Image: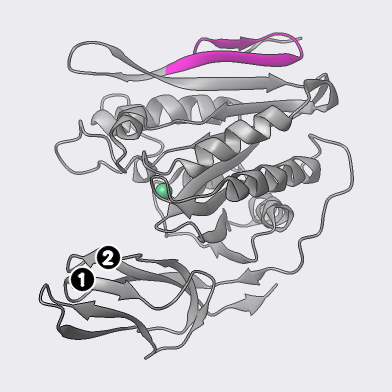
Amino acid sequence: MKPIEVGTAVSTAPGVSHGSLNVGALPDGSPVDIPVIIVRGAADGPTLWLHGCVHGNEYCGTFIIHEFIRRLDPAQLSGTVVALPVLNRPAFQKNQRMSPFEGMGGGDLNRCFPGRADGSVTEQMGHAIYTALRQHADYLVDFHTAFTADTRWALFADLGGEVSKKGLEMARAFGFAHTLPAPKGILVGSSMMTAGAEGIPSFNVEAGGMGPAFTPEVVEDGAERLLNVARQLGLLAGAVHDYGPLVLFSNFHWVCATQAGLYQPLVACGQKIEAGQVVGRYFDVFGESLGDAVAPSTGIALAVHPGPIMARGETLIHIGLDPRGD
Ligand SMILES: [Zn+2]
């Protein structure tokens, strides 16, 4: 078989290969090498590229990718899975969203793609990852999480043609009902929109919460849904499960807290909310009420700040706008 090489991971025959891709260097000179897993199928087919922890504290996706790969049998696979379960390794080590080695702006790896070879710490990281992605990926699935364990929604690059068609197919096969067909101009510099603009159908999962805020059930469910995506894309044989109709959004609204305090949320992810609805309560450090947090838009709650403390300007709630059937 023609070799597939991503960093030091080399695949020349059906089976699983491990290696690493260098994306930078730490102040002591030690390399930042991120893990690469290649699962090569017995038969030819497309290459599905998976990555997680582009935001370092969003570990649920890493667990989903690992579980998916455990369930893959190379003998049954037509094509290749390339998985990078820990993209932002310095941030992963610190249990934080962004790399600790980015002093100036531009520290969000998921706004830095396609990156720059001579750019900032994070841009160089983005460049190394995206160069390999562009070379190999026929499809991309990127895993993220929000605040809480009950986060369940998805996005795909809706940039026209095959990218939109295959993106919608991946969304349907993954089957999270709440899905945003992401229009041109949002999430600029994300791997999803960058790859989508270059003709690679790209899908983004938001499942589970940050840090430890996810359950084994979310991981198993995510792996099962990813197997269904692999069936939809022709990497695995078998009937594609129908998870039912999707609810699509026109866009989303990030709502920032306009005050600070102890905070108790009153809504859950997936819940329909109306403009003007009370979504949480603020208290001061004496326990006195500071008033209510009110939703400014109607839609579906995609992510909800879990409390118990809120700084002014933090993301209070993330609302999917104009929900409609597909
Ligand atoms: Zn993220």
The mark found on residue 235 in the picture is: none
Determine crowd level at label 2: few under 14, some 14-19, many 20+ residues with C-alpha closer than 10 A: few
184 displayed left or right of 210: right
Q: Does the residue tagged 1 have its C-beta within 8 Å of any atom of ligand 1?
A: no
Q: Residue shown at 45%/17% (left/top)?
A: 21
Q: Residue 150: x percent and y percent?
A: 51, 61
Q: Which of 142 and 274 is in front in this view?
A: 274
The mark found on residue 262 in the picture is: 1
**Residue range corresponding to the magenta coloring:** 7-21
Q: Which residue lies furthest to the left in this view?
A: 286
10 magenta-colored: yes
Asked if residue 30 is positioned above or below residue 179 in the image, the reply reads above
Q: Residue 311: x percent and y percent?
A: 18, 65
Q: Nearer the viewer, residue 254 or 305?
A: 305
Amino acid carrying label 2: it is: Pro
Q: Residue 294: x percent and y percent?
A: 32, 85
The answer, for residue 195, to whether it is visible in the render is no
Residue to which mark 2 is pinned: 308
* Dots 2, 1 in contact, CB < 8 A: yes
